[in-house]
Image: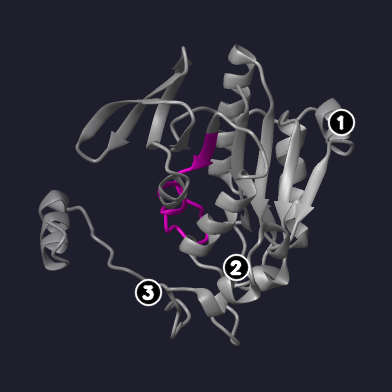
Amino acid sequence: MNIVVLVKQVPDTWSERKLSDADHTLDRDAADAVLDEINERAVEEALVLQAEHGGEVTVLSMGPDRATDAIRKALSMGADKAIHVSDPALHGSDALTTAKVLAKALATVEFDLVVAGNEATDGRAGAVPAILAELLGLPQLTHVRKVTVEGGVVKAVRETDEGVAHLEASLPAVLSVNEKINEPRYPSFKGIMAAKKKPVTTLTASDLGLGADEVGLGAAWTQVVEAAPKPPRTAGQRVEDEGDGGSKIAEYLVGQKLI
């Protein structure tokens, strides 16, 4: 079974993140960059399925040149090869355009299953896997916390605020996982060294048949028109427990319209 895992390099959540003054897109140079944690879990799940069913695991990423670091980490975990879509024209692409680009890139490889994280920690749109499935005309199984594959059928447990749903679809399909799916492995030294020699195919938008006017900020259907710094944290309100601490806390929460 051949699996493609979608991965994204994002600003480290411990770094100070900000938008650029010029176009209000994410200032990627202002923060340390890492492989998104949910993508590590997507890679892990792909490797688990590969161990059970054989085949290859291909990493697919759209991002600037330095996204290579995130790709190499996925390869060091055990993925076999990678495709990196990198082009300055892609700067500012929204979720819809990103899905279109990924769909074009997926047309260059044979696959049975696409595995992604449910949402990236930078944009948090959580829409790309579903849009991608629609563009590819494939069934989608999203927000999955458990998955099995048997006889050309993928079965998954989807978690929602209301409970869980049991999903089933024929392959090929698109799957997105949540943070409960697994605990990702740490790359071994052998894996890190091997990743340096694994093939990474680099493609541009034109390689995928996309014109500059079809991608990037100019083609985006969404736009950030204004941004302001997060206000500083206030000192808060101290509650002294004199035997009535519970009541005071309840009064405070009522005052904040939280209960």
Mark sitting earlier along the chain (2/3): 2
- Number of other residues with Cα within 10 Å of mark 1, as a class: few under 14, some 14 to 19, many 20 or more: some
x and y percentages locating residue 21 in the rendered image: 59, 86
139 to 219, vertically: above or below: above
Residue at image position (58%, 68%) is 17
Q: Tell me the magenta residue range.
A: 114-130
x and y percentages locating residue 121 in the rendered image: 51, 55
x and y percentages locating residue 98 in the rendered image: 54, 59
Horizontal side, residue 81 vs residue 213: left or right: right
Mark sitting earlier along the chain (2/1): 2
Q: Amino acid at mark 1?
A: Ala
138 to 169, vertically: above or below: below
Q: Is residue 25 visible?
A: no
Of badges 2 and 1, the one in the foreground is 1
Circle on res. 16: 2
Q: Is residue 122 magenta?
A: yes
* Residue underneath mark 3: 234
- Number of other residues with Cα within 10 Å of mark 3, as a class: few under 14, some 14 to 19, many 20 or more: few
Quarter-wise, where is residue 226 in the image? bottom left
Q: Which is more toward the observer, 19 or 229?
A: 19
Name the quarter where the C terminus is drawn. bottom left
Q: CA distance from mark 2 to mark 1?
A: 33 Å
- The reply to whether discs 3 and 1 touch (Cβ–Cβ < 8 Å) is no
